[in-house]
């Protein structure tokens, strides 16, 4: 790769983080922390908790459900850290009534869940399956009975394996639109908000470029058609939902990762700009501005699929949105040079890699999953969003990253103060960032979705990274649920807002 000059951009690559004025201390008592959060929750601000179908539903062979790419991926040796799969997981299909009761007792405004594409449409095409329809009918009726609004994601990474080529195949965008229209007709009278796709950047980067997620392809820059086809599928799905006359609001959820160069060297700055384009702007610009970002000149060959986009596709992608979902992803520090992996004997392992690598944030702690725990970067993400996209619809923040070790006492109560601190600090940082005169004051921050309601199958990490507010005993056939301290914290905060 030739030496390249840094991209010049109106958006600073490394804005100075503004520390939250209420940075928490882990040892503080959770009731006090709940009271602090309750005092900060604005009137009308929507608080939700989230799950996804593949991660919690189980019943993988029940009711005619088909295989998704994640079913196939998790059956391959070495793909999942603990060798597990999601065939049973939290067994939500059997325990949905108990989970609805947990949501009611928690006091959230809304539940963000996803429809299992292969539970409703086993082969990714055709009429919706009656058993899948019956299950989601029961779930929605239970939520309505408890006064809980619903936010439904059409596809949370569970593309049917029967759709050959997945998102590399343009035809999948059309199949997704057909599915969206059918689901909209079936449930459009009971869904309050619709998310077409969740984090298409993660699907492209992890699933098609690097192979750490399903479907396990290692195409690097040749994965970019999967990005375009997902965005085209989003635009077509928005049109399909509106054609089905759904009553709920419509949007999507995109990741945003604050990116900075490891040094001021030209190469580090250029690769940081490239990663910002690949992880952020490639997915947000077409949806919000109607065009792909200008490819960096030095990478024109690698980004050729962006240069060759049909303008009519971009018009389809840029559908008017009722809301925009921001999935905050911890910051990335980028340096030139491919990642070099070694085996236990110190020998290089040939693996696909970008021409850049990630440098650690040694000045910040991390979660047990290795994610940077620096709440002030939420302000950076929101400020970048405000600068780049001045006409944003209301924004809903998705907060994940709460993977921490849980500790059960002699009475089996689960204590997770680190998760409480992580979620509270990040949300309060978002409130500070969007306050009047703050860097992201132009953003209408309308709500938050905490990940996650339940411990679940956490993708390639299997069951090694619990993120739930509710502990699930995966060694128990009944999948016994136990609310954690973080559940009580949020419950208390919502009761006192």
Image: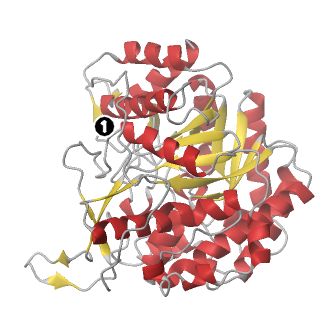
Q: Nearer the viewer, residue 98 or 250?
A: 250
Please tell me how crowded label 1 is: few (under 14), some (14-19), or many (20+) other residues with Cα within 10 Å.
Answer: some
Can the viewer see residue 273?
Answer: yes
Residue 140: x, y in percent?
76, 41
* Quarter of the picture holding the C terminus: top right
Query: How many numbered badges does the structure rendering display?
Result: 1
Would you say 214 lies left or right of 191 here?
A: left
Residue 326: x, y in percent?
57, 47
Residue 75: x, y in percent?
45, 75
Per the image, label 1 sits on a secondary structure element best described as: loop
Q: Say which residue appears at 33% left-offset and 65% top-offset.
A: 269
Residue 4: x, y in percent?
34, 78
Q: Nearer the viewer, residue 425 or 285?
A: 285
Asked which quadrant contains residue 104, the reply is top right
Q: Nearer the viewer, residue 496 or 313?
A: 313
Q: Say which residue appears at 29% left-offset and 69% top-offset.
A: 266
Q: Which residue is mark 1?
A: 406
Give the vertical position of 496 relative to 221 (above or below).
above
Q: Say which residue appears at 55% left-offset and 11% top-offset.
A: 496
Asked which quadrant contains residue 5, the reply is bottom left
Find the residue positioned furthest to the left.
345
Q: Say which residue appears at 47% left-offset and 60% top-offset.
A: 9
Can the viewer see residue 217?
Answer: no
Give the vertical position of 104 relative to 255 (above or below).
above
Q: Colour mode?
A: secondary structure
Asked which quadrant contains residue 197, the reply is bottom right
* Quarter of the picture holding the N terminus: bottom left
């Amino acid at each position: 790769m030739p030496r390249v000059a840094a991209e010049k951009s109106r958006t600073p690559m490394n804005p100075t983080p503004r520390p939250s004025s209420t940075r928490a201390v882990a040892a503080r008592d959770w009731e006090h922390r709940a009271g602090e959060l309750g005092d900060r929750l604005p009137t009308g601000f929507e608080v939700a908790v989230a799950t996804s179908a593949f991660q919690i539903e189980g019943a993988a062979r029940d009711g005619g459900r088909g295989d998704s790419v994640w079913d196939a991926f998790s059956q391959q040796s070495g793909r999942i850290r603990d060798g597990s799969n999601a065939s049973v997981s939290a067994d939500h299909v059997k325990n949905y009534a108990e989970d609805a009761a947990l949501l009611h007792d928690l006091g959230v405004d809304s539940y963000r869940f996803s429809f299992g594409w292969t539970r409703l449409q086993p082969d990714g095409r055709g009429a919706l399956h009656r058993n899948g329809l019956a299950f989601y009918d029961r779930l929605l009726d239970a939520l309505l009975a408890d006064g809980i609004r619903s936010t439904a994601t059409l596809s949370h990474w569970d593309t049917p394996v029967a759709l050959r080529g997945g998102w590399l195949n343009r035809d999948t965008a059309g199949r997704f639109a057909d599915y969206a229209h059918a689901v909209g007709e079936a449930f459009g009278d009971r869904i309050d908000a619709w998310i077409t796709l969740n984090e298409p950047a993660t699907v492209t980067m992890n699933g098609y470029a690097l192979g750490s997620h399903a479907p396990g392809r290692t195409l690097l820059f040749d994965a970019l058609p999967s990005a375009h086809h997902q965005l085209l599928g989003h635009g077509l799905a928005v049109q399909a939902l509106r054609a089905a006359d759904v009553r709920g609001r419509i949007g999507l959820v995109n990741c945003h990762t604050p990116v900075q160069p490891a040094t001021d060297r030209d190469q580090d700055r250029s690769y940081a700009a490239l990663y910002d384009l690949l992880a952020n702007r490639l997915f947000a610009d077409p949806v919000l501005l109607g065009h792909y970002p200008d490819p960096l000149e030095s990478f024109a060959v690698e980004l050729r699929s962006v240069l060759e986009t049909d303008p009519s596709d971009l018009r389809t992608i840029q559908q008017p949105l009722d809301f925009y979902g921001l999935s905050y992803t911890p910051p990335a520090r980028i340096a030139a040079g491919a990642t070099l992996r070694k085996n236990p004997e110190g020998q290089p392992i040939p693996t696909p890699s970008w021409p850049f690598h990630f440098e650690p944030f040694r000045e910040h702690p991390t979660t047990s999953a290795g994610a940077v725990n620096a709440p002030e970067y939420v302000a950076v993400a929101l400020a970048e969003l405000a600068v780049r996209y001045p006409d944003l619809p209301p924004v809903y923040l998705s907060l994940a990253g709460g993977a921490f070790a849980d500790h059960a006492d002699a009475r089996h109560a689960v204590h997770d103060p680190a998760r409480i601190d992580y979620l509270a600090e990040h949300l309060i940082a978002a409130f500070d960032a969007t306050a009047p005169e703050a860097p992201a004051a132009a953003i209408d921050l309308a709500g938050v979705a905490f990940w996650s309601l339940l411990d679940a199958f956490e993708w390639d990490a299997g069951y090694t990274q619990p993120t739930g507010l509710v502990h699930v005993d995966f060694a128990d056939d009944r999948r016994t649920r136990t609310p954690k301290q973080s559940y009580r914290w949020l419950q208390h905060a919502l009761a006192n807002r």
